[in-house]
């Protein structure tokens, strides 16, 4: 989320100040806060000017003190573990390691007392109502411009004013379904709005996750402090959005439109979609026909009534807005224009994110609402006005100069920190295009205690608050918010992108709080997903299919590698060395090891190569590379999995920092065992917990295809024609997890014919080839298809052919005489299987995931 | 003067396109001195939905969706338009350009609201010192606005070479200024950038120009093209059209389709297709005075 700068102001007050708590006697800082020393002259949330604890913090502070240092540290570790388990992440742009960075949550909440919150709440609700009216006017009759309440340049020079969005119909007259404001508290105790977020505000999902984590690690404190619950706010969002469906009011389909997994707050998109019961979609999942929006599912097009978007205004429609964007939906503006879909927030609502609007809000509020603005904004001078421009140029040293209109790239400039040349350049820029700049007063932020390195220290904070429309005349405010803290006590810039942390925000209640929550103890939504969640976009099916394939490929690779590591560690008996040579040769034919391993090789050399095959991410088909693919795809489809299932996927990890050559074999072996067990847990949950819908079917389809392909390839590489299978038989059964079965079934020694019978022909062996092909046949039969497909789909016919071929083959016989070499026919059969399976995979992809490209002509 | 206009665009796709959306601005708008006697839009294959509407600037705009699989899309707009002569402005009766600039920036609504839309940067036109520098010699202190504009128009005509190979839609305006080459669209953008850099309001006009067939030869079907010029805002004369490509004040030989801040606001056809592969674009335009012998519109 974009950072507000903390340097804000307090003059130009036009609203009634929100009074801070009066200082109170007593309330000395207890032991665990020893050394807590806010900077003098600033406002500290916890302590008053004399260093005493403010009254509304006392119960919390003494409770934390009773827990003691050690217990707090334990709980903090616990909190971080929960965050890892939940997979709460935040992507940092421009940092290769920045993807999926764990969310930073501080253990100490920010406490706000009831009376103070009521004033803030009223101010925020009023502000959202006001901004909604301004949007409705600018995108409608423009009376404010005509009658002189807003300078036209504020709109006309504003890149956020999207002409194609003018005059779009708005259901319920709501443009601003969701509003966020960043608040800062000045030294006087006064709260100020320092920025508004009006197009696709982020952070509400993180606020919710913060609450879930904190209420779990501090349950008694949470209960005793009578903290206001967040659930009803989200209920309002859901109810409002569902009420705005133009075409299917009884059973509306609501989707959450995300730019995709590379967006900084993708975690939250997924999280909110699940929590609210909306289908998570990307632009490519949607299409416009006949001026209506549809979601492309495997079973055809399904209508969409409401789009909660996390894509910025300009990127929502490549046809009428930015043509170079592929994040949106072509024709979306026209669908809105025709009144067939509601987009929240309304397209073009980014218009009023610019700081240039701030100085006009008090006047607009009096004009439009006949009320005084309750919550003041930071003092701002818009250079588009001559007097204000003169003031800014005269007071450059005291002000921060910012873009007047919201733009991603420009950083605020501190007049006092500029050298002569920079200053001259800035002055020239302001004179040339004055309407593009504002000057703002600077304000020091208030501080609150952060449980840093096992002690509390004061850090500057900004509070992001949220309001949602119940109707155009009535906005509900989230009782709480996302408190963001700066990375250090000295650094005054608060921003998630620059690495700050966050806090839960506890709005204290005057009376008992009803313990209603929409969440189970696990942090999973209790609210059932709406009917829309049952739909499977083709893109998701594609990802599930590949997740199935990669998970299986990973398991196959790990089993193969474990088989070798076991023997390298000398745990596999006397035959170890000879078996290793045979295994190494198989891996050479499998193109996983270089040719030099065809002959006899020093074990140390083999060990290094195998460690590389496990740990080296840049090595093709290394376990770590496959695992990265698993994780990458899993993170895209995590909304399709239960919490437990996701936890397992999220846990899969191969230590990335280790230098492969230095890793002891025992450690590698332990790691392989852990991951193989985790993968078994994943497949177990998949079998036992996943509804047998299309999602499961594609996941399993991928798994069965991959397992059959891997097996055919492994057998082909292990048993080339004319070579006696010798010592490879047992390791192979071990890789295929069929050694026990074999021993129970065949009392004689291990023979290739019998091995093939078990691994290829036996339809009862879930690790065997026949089992996979029969499962594929069942999938092919049950996938959706066009109405008339006489003789079945091409996939069905191909699987049927495979099955016939398999049943007709004398596989046992192809194994050759006891202790002899396999028949030539074995290689032919396995080669044919591999080719057929490859074609089958392509056919499935082509039929169900046909990839389409949008292009602007 | 009455014209029969035909503008045909053909997209040939190398692969089948299953869905396409297009926004079309090919039908001239009604104006005080421009009457629309007839207009029609033909689309092949027939669109699943088509809607005629007006955009933010009041231009005619159609939104069409073709939902059947197709490898070729043909869009033909035909119109019969009557154009009346434009009043000849008296440049010296226009106010000094600095006065106009001040009026445009004043806080009172009125002038600012009407012209302000065309005063600031737009997606294809970003002003800067280079444009101001180029424009300055035409605007000495106190010069009447239109005198300055006519001088600037003449200089662009004189100092820039018409060269269809020099630029594409994506060529930055700064390159046009540097290399002094381009087509009508570039010259219109350039002059707009110059005027906006001085704090004046200028808008982009899209339309057609009647051309003469080569001496002694018949008019060739489809030989004409879309044209572009600009209009500058003068508090006395209102919007005054100027054509830097031909160094003249448009009158009866120019047919206005619509206007916007720049090309992007009035692009004749903008589309997004669902499909892959390349496409070949063919455009044929005819602007025929209706007293001339008729031939079938290019198909």
Image: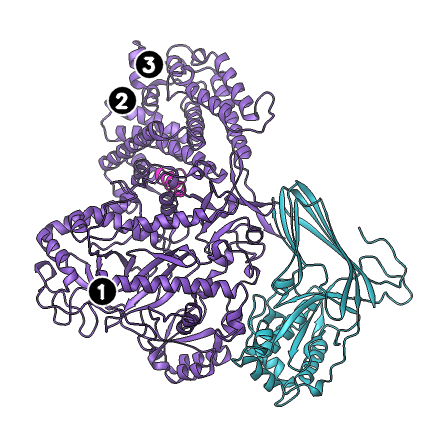
Tag nearer the camera, 3 or 2:
3
Q: A277 or A406, which is in the foreground?
A: A277
Q: Which mark is residue A296?
A: none
Disc 1 target residue: A459
Judging from the image, mark 3 belongs to the subunit labelled: A
Q: Position of residue A736 (x, y in %)?
A: 35, 23
Q: Is residue A13 left or right of residue B253?
A: left
- Colour used to depict chain A in the structure image: purple
Which structural element holds mark 2?
Answer: loop
- Colour used to depict chain B in the structure image: cyan
Tally the marks: 3
Q: Is residue A693 above or below residue A293?
A: above
Disc 2 target residue: A575
Q: Earlier in the sequence, mark 3 or mark 2?
A: 2
Tag nearer the camera, 3 or 1:
1
> For the residues marked 3 and 1, what is the alpha-carbon distance in whole angstroms?
69 Å
Tag nearer the camera, 2 or 1:
1
Residue A658 visible, this angle: no
Disc 3 target residue: A750
Q: Does the magenta run of residues contain A845?
A: no
> For the residues marked 2 and 1, what is the alpha-carbon distance in whole angstroms?
64 Å
Q: Position of residue A733 (x, y in %)?
A: 33, 20
Q: Is residue A50 left or right of residue A320?
A: left
Q: Does the magenta run of residues contain A630?
A: yes
Mark 1: give few (<14), some (14-19) or many (20+) Cα within 10 Å.
many
Can you say which quadrant of the picture contains the N terminus of chain B? bottom right
């Amino acid at each position: 989320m974009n950072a507000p700068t903390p340097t804000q102001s307090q003059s130009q007050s036009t609203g009634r100040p929100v009074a801070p708590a009066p200082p109170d006697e007593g309330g000395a800082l207890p032991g665990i806060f020893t050394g807590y020393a806010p900077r003098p002259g600033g406002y500290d949330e916890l302590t008053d000017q004399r260093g005493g604890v403010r009254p509304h913090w006392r119960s919390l502070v003494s409770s934390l003190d009773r827990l003691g240092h050690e217990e707090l540290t334990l709980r903090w570790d616990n909190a971080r573990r929960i965050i890892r388990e939940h997979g709460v992440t935040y992507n940092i742009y421009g940092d290769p390691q920045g993807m999926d960075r764990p969310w930073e949550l501080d253990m100490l909440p920010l406490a706000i007392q009831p009376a103070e919150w009521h004033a803030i709440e009223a101010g925020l609700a009023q502000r959202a109502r006001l901004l909604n009216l301004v949007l409705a006017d600018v995108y409608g009759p423009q009376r404010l411009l005509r009658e002189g309440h807003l300078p036209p340049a504020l709109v006309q020079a504003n890149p956020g004013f999207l002409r194609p969005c003018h005059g779009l119909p708005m259901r319920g007259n709501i443009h601003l379904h969701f509003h966020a404001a960043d608040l800062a508290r000045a030294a006087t105790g006064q709260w100020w709005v320092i920025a508004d977020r009006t197009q696709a505000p982020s952070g509400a999902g993180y606020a919710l996750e913060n609450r879930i984590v904190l209420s779990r690690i501090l349950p008694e404190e949470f209960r005793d402090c009578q903290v206001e619950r967040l659930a009803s706010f989200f209920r309002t969002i859901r109810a409002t959005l569902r009420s705005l469906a133009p075409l299917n009011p009884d059973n509306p389909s609501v989707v959450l439109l995300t730019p995709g997994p590379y967006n900084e707050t993708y975690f939250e998109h997924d999280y909110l979609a699940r929590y609210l019961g909306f289908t998570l979609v990307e632009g490519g999942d949607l299409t416009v026909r006949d001026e209506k929006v549809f979601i492309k599912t495997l079973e055809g097009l399904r209508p969409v009534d409401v789009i909660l978007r996390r894509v910025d205004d300009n990127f929502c429609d490549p046809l009428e807005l930015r043509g170079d964007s592929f994040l949106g939906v072509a024709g979306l503006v026209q669908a809105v224009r025709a009144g067939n879909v509601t987009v929240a927030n309304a397209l073009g609502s980014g218009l009023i994110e610019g700081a240039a609007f701030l100085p006009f809000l008090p006047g607009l509020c009096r004009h439009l609402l006949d009320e005084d603005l309750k919550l003041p904004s930071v003092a701002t001078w818009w250079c588009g006005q001559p007097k204000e421009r003169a003031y800014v140029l005269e007071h450059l040293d005291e002000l921060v100069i910012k873009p007047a209109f919201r733009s991603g790239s420009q950083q605020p400039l501190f007049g006092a920190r500029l050298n002569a040349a920079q200053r001259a350049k800035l002055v020239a820029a302001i004179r040339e295009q004055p309407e593009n700049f504002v000057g703002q007063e600077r304000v020091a932020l208030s501080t609150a205690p952060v449980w840093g390195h096992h002690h509390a220290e004061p850090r500057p904070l900004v509070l992001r608050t949220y309001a949602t429309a119940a109707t155009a005349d009535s906005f509900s405010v989230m009782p709480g918010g996302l408190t963001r803290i700066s990375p250090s006590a000295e650094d005054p810039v608060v921003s998630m992108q620059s690495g700050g942390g966050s806090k839960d925000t506890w709005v204290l209640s005057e009376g008992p709080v009803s313990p209603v929550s929409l969440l189970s103890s696990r942090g999973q939504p209790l609210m059932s997903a709406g009917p829309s969640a049952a739909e499977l976009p083709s893109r998701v099916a594609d990802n599930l299919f590949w997740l199935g394939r990669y998970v299986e490929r990973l398991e196959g690779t790990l089993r193969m590698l474990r088989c070798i590591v076991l023997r390298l560690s000398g745990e596999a008996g006397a035959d170890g060395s000879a078996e290793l040579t045979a295994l190494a040769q198989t891996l050479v034919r499998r193109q996983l090891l270089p040719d030099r391993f065809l002959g006899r090789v020093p074990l140390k050399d083999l060990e290094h190569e195998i460690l590389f095959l496990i740990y080296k991410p840049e090595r093709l088909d290394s376990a770590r590379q496959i695992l990265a693919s698993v994780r990458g795809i899993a993170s895209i489809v995590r909304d399709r999995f239960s919490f437990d299932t996701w936890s397992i996927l999220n846990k899969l990890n191969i230590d990335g920092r280790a230098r492969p050559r230095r890793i002891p074999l025992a450690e590698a072996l332990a790691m392989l065992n852990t991951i193989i067990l985790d993968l078994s847990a994943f497949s177990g949950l998949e079998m036992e917990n996943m509804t047998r819908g299309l999602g499961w079917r594609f996941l399993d389809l991928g798994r069965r295809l991959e397992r059959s392909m891997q097996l055919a390839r492994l057998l082909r590489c292990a048993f080339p024609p004319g070579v006696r299978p010798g010592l490879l038989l047992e390791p192979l059964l071990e890789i295929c997890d069929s050694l026990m079965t074999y021993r129970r079934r065949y009392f004689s020694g291990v023979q290739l014919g019998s091995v093939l019978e078990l691994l290829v022909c036996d339809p009862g062996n879930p690790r065997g080839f026949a089992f996979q092909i029969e499962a594929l046949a069942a999938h092919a039969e049950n996938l959706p298809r066009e109405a008339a497909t006489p003789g079945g789909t091409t996939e069905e016919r191909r699987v049927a052919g495979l099955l016939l071929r398999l049943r007709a083959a004398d596989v046992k016989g192809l194994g050759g005489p006891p202790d002899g070499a396999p028949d030539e026919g074995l290689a032919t059969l396995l080669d044919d299987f591999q080719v057929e399976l490859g074609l089958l995979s392509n056919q499935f992809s082509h039929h169900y995931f046909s990839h389409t490209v949008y292009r602007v002509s | 003067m009455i014209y029969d206009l035909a503008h045909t665009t053909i997209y040939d796709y190398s692969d089948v396109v299953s869905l396409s959306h297009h926004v079309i601005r090919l039908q001239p708008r009604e104006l005080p001195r421009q009457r629309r006697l007839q207009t029609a839009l033909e689309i092949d294959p027939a669109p699943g939905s088509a809607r005629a509407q007006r955009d933010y600037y009041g231009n005619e705009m159609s939104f069409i969706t073709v939902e059947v699989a197709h490898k070729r899309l043909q869009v033909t707009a035909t119109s019969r338009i009557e154009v009346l002569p434009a009043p000849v402005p008296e440049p010296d009766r226009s106010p000094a350009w600095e006065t106009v600039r001040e009026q445009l920036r004043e806080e009172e609504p009125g002038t600012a609201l009407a012209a302000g839309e065309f005063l600031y940067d737009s997606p294809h036109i970003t002003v800067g010192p280079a444009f101001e520098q180029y424009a300055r010699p035409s605007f000495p202190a106190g010069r009447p606005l239109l005198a300055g504009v006519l001088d600037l128009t003449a200089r662009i005509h004189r100092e820039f070479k018409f060269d269809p190979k020099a630029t594409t839609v994506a060529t930055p305006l700064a390159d046009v200024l540097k290399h002094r080459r381009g087509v009508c669209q570039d010259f219109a953008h350039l002059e707009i950038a110059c005027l906006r850099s001085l704090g004046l309001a200028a808008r982009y006009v899209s339309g057609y120009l009647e051309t003469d067939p080569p001496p002694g030869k018949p008019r060739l079907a489809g030989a004409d093209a879309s044209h572009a010029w600009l209009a500058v805002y003068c508090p006395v004369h209102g919007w005054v059209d100027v054509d830097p490509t031909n160094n003249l004040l448009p009158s009866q030989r120019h047919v206005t389709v619509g206007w916007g801040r720049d090309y992007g606001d009035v692009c004749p056809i903008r589309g997004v297709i669902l499909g892959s592969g390349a496409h070949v674009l063919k455009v044929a335009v005819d602007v025929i005075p209706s007293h001339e012998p008729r031939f079938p519109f290019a198909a």
